[in-house]
Structure formats: structure tokens, C-alpha cells
Image (tube, helix red, strand yellow):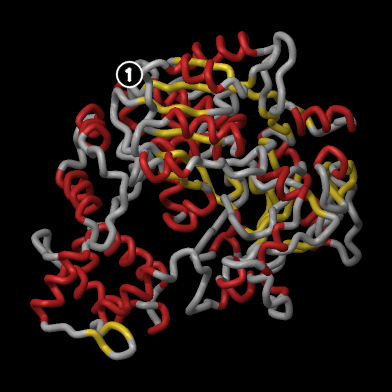
Amino acid sequence: LASRPLLSVAQNILPLRQPRRPHSMAPPDFYALLGVDRAATNEQVRNAYRDCAMQHHPDRGGDPAVWSALQRAYDTLSDPQKRAVYDRTKQDGSVGAEKAFGQAFAEKGEGAAQQRGLSIEAEMAEAKGKGSTLAAAGFDMSHAQGFEAWMRNQKGMGKQSFYTAEDLLRSRQYGNIEATESTAQPLPALSATAVRFDAHGPPEEVLYVDRACSLPDKLAHGEVLVHMLAACVTDEDLLRVQTPLTVLNDFPPFNRTNNKWEAVPLPATAGVEGVGVVIATAKNVPTLKDHPLEVKDWVLLRPEARRRPAGCWSTMAVVDSSMLVKVPAQLMPVRHLACSRSLCTAYRLLEDYGSLRPGDTIIQNAADLPVGQAVVQLCKMLKIRSINLVPDDEAFEQTKELLVQLGASHVLRDNAKVGEFIDALGQMMPRLGIDSLGGEAGKRMSVALRPGGQLVMHSLQTGQVPTISPSLLMYQQISLHGFNMAQWVDENGVEAYKDMLNTIGELVQAGNLELATAEAPVRGMEPSALKAALSSHRRGAAGRPRERSVLVLGSEAAANEVYFELQASIRSMYGADEPQTPAAVA
């Protein structure tokens, strides 16, 4: 793979909108799932979906997995653009990388990224042809139209209709429902080194290292014990420490949906993103229909928007298997796996916004942090020019040198001197702006965009939304968007997320996606070192650019050692009449 040309490797990024599946999985035929042929009209597809819904919807006793596949098939075949891409891919699944690049990126055109909406003219013509009339209390709709509208409006509203027994056993809303002890796995006395907090507040003030954090005495139904390897210090990690997001549950629109933020019982271990190795499981986990895991599986924390953090800033953590994503062992270096959400965020921002094509231009701030570094390198492979704004600090020249080495087209100082900023841009008018800061920094980027450009926020380090001038919104048609990886996974599924990780892994292994981060070992960490790790991404020093910190929590070799010690302790528990408590394993 490393010997392949750069452009050939770059083609593996695409088609991005439907990430490539692992070679061991045969993609389903959407036409066969719905029982229609390739020439079926939209009406025939809709009718077939309705018939399948009557038979396979979980409310009628259907299999949730089958129903999920049917929904994906209908979502694809009912959208002309998605259907066209799907047809090309299915008919020529063995096309070369360069042809795939042309089909899925260069050919998608100016408006391909815009989602299909309602065609008033077409709907009026259809209503006239069928003789439809307005009902006194609203609109007459067929059963299929009504069901389709209901399904469409459930997206993003939380789980609505059916709960399986597994849902009830795992849901924290029903604390009095528990599995029998037959599925639990008793554990010896274990302790870990963890970064914890007793109250919400500024992370530098409330976080501390607990060198003897006790772990539960058993793995309950669906739980696994993970030996953590590494975790990146992200803005979301710090936000969840600083603020209990449950306060939002009482305010609209959040109080009108079932998507509620879960409370974080204090004291708690910090950390929402990380990579680790499973070293023990509850007895039912290897045979689960959903989220099965086995000992020695490598796992990532699944991006979750509303569930309480798993607490992965610890050398060992007990985690519900539904919050984990299994990945191939050593898919990419541990540092990259710890920052995998940043890599995936960069991947999606370039694919889902701006209708980008080779030769276009994007602009981003915080370009020196992991998301920005990945955007720079992906743009280089996709032949897209990147304008990169970085802090105007003492390390600017070193930061600029780093980004230029990664493939940046332009590196500019990000400061309040708007006149100098516009002069530096010259005639360049980016199609897409990627905002990590918000506030005035995002506002400056909106001024630089071409008519019809999109400004996308994926993080708000300032805690403020960019204030865009009404003249830009109305007369330049600049649009403001928000992106959240957890939300994307909720809407597109874990399999799509894993496919994306596999593609990124190939690019990393080929040497085309590098990351500059700072390692911070947790074992033996002093309070001053912890504070430095929490703030290393905020400002560079003379001769040293700022960097995201990656907390080093363990190693694969250490995970193997702990596994064997743990198994010996468990055997002694079962083998002795009065099992002795083994020494704590940290």
C-alpha cells in the first residue's frame, strides 16, 4: 500500500457519503430487500416500503436489524441523487481508485450536497392528478404518506415506539429492572489510576489524579472491563467536566424530545473518547446479538451525544458494551486511535458540506489542532486548496512550518486585524469555512466566504456562536451549520462509522495522515503535569506550537499481563471455599 501513488491512496477516501465496507462484508442489495427491480418508480419503491413496514416493523414483531436495513434501503432508493450514486457503485463495484474518485467526488456537482426537499410544483401536480382535496382539519394523506411522514419526523427525537428486553436491562431510566446474577461476572478487588472530579467546575481546578480508584466487584449484564491504552483531551471532555448538561433538559427544544442528557453521578471519572483492550466480560456479552465483544478485542468509545461519559481517563474502566465500537487490532497507531473522532470529523466536514470539488478552496481556524491537521492532509490528497488560520502567538512560524509540511496551501495569523486578513486572502473566496472557535473568529471567516458558502461549526472553544451579518445571510446566501460526530453516528449507524474508520486506517498506514500531539503519561502524573495536559492546546510557547495532549494510560503488553493476573484471581475465587482477595491490579 505504501508504494501506491499518493492520488491512488487518496481515492480510498471516496465515495465518502457511503463509506466503503470491509472486504469481508458483502453489501446488501437494496432493490432485493424491498422486492423491486432496478427500473422501479418512486411510487413503486414507496409502496414496497409500506408493505415491508407492515410485515417487519418492530411494533409488529419484526426484527429490528431487518427493519434498520429496510430503512437504509428506502432512504437510498427514494432519493434520486443517492440512488444514482448507489446504482453506479453497485454496477461497477470493482472500479479502480481513480474512477471511483471521479464518480463520487468530481462528478457530484455544485448542488449534490444539498438534501432533497419538497417540490411544491410536483406535489401540486400529483394532487391535481389524483383529485386530492384539503380536509377540514388538515391534509388528506394516504396511509403510506402518513407513515412516511411519521417515520421522517422521528429522527433526532429519541427512542419512541418499541423497547426490547435488552433495552430495558441497560437503560438507566429503569433502575429497578436488573438482569439475574447468572449473567454477571464477579471480579476480585481491583483499583486503577484515574483522572476524577468530585464536582463540576473549571477542569484545571476540579480534576485530580486518583491512584487507587476502586472498580466494581462484578461486571453486570452487558458490561466489560477495558484496559485503556490512551485518550485524547478534547473540548467535549472538558465541557462535560465543567458543566452538567442535564440543565438543558428543562429548556426547549430539548424538553420536547426523548433525547435527554443523562446525569453524571459524582464523584466521576472523566473522559468520553479513548481506545482500549477488553480484558474481561460479563457472561452474556460474547453472545449478544448487538455489540458482542470478546476478551482481547480492541475497542473505541462510541461517540454518544446524550449518555453520560464512560469515564475512560483511567487505566481500567468498566463500560457497557453498547458504548464501545470494536475495531481491528492495531488498525492505526494508538495515538491516531485516541484521536479518531477528530480524524472522522475532518473526513465528514469535507464530504458533507460545501459541495467541494478538486480546485475549490476551504478556510479553517484552529488548523494546528488534530481536526485541522487532518483537514489539511485530506485537502492535499483531494486537490483542494486550504487556507489555515492559526494563533498569532510566539510559535506562529513553527506552526506554519508544520502545516506547510503537512500540505497547507496558505497559513495566516488569526487575529482581530480584519483588514490585513482580507488583504492576505486576495482573490481567494473559499466555498467552505470550518469553525472550531465560534464567536468573533467564526464571524471573520464568514466574511471571507464566496456567495453561497457554508460556515460549519464543529466545536465552540469560545462558547459563543458566530454572529453573522444579516447582509451576508440575505444577500450573499451564507449559511451557518453545526456538526457533531455523535449525532452523525446516531443517524447513520455504527457500521458506517466503522467503515469510515477502516478507510482512515488505510490512509494512516500508508503514511498519508500524520498527527502532531503531546503525550502525557497518567501513571505518576503530578498535579502540575495534569494542568499542563489540560491546557496544552490553548497557546503555544516560543519555539513550541500548541498541541492536543494524549493521555497515555497503558499498553498492549500491560493489558496482556493484567489479563493473565485477572484470570488467575478469578480462578482462585471460584476454586476456594473462601476465596482470598488478590492484590489490587493497577
Residue in view at x 87 percent, y 40 percent: 205
Instruction: Give above or below for 1 relative to 239.
Output: above
Instruction: Give above or below for 253 relative to 268.
Output: below
Quarter the N terminus occupies: top left
Q: In the image, residue 376 lies at what x, y percent?
A: 46, 23
Q: In the image, residue 405 lies at what x, y percent?
A: 50, 11
Asked if residue 547 lies left or right of residue 481, the reply is right
Asked if residue 310 lies left or right of residue 53, the reply is right
* Residue type beneath disc 1: Arg
Q: How many marks?
A: 1
Most foreground residue, 502 or 548: 548
Asked if residue 322 lies left or right of residue 127, the reply is right
Most foreground residue, 94 or 401: 401
Q: In the image, residue 184 lies at what x, y percent?
A: 71, 67
Instruction: Give above or below for 164 relative to 206.
Output: below
- Per the image, label 1 sits on a secondary structure element best described as loop
Residue 563 visible? The answer is: no
Residue at the farthest bottom position: 136
Other-residue count near label 1 (Cα within 10 Å), few / some / many at <14 / 14–19 / ≥20: few
Q: Looking at the rendering, which quadrant does residue 3 occupy?
A: top left
Residue marked by disc 1: 4
Residue in view at x 83 percent, y 42 percent: 193
Quarter the C terminus occupies: top right
Residue 112 visible? The answer is: yes
Residue in view at x 67 percent, y 43 percent: 463
Most foreground residue, 78 or 291: 78
Most foreground residue, 422 or 316: 422
Q: In the image, residue 140 lies at what x, y percent?
A: 25, 85
Residue in view at x 85 percent, y 55 percent: 267
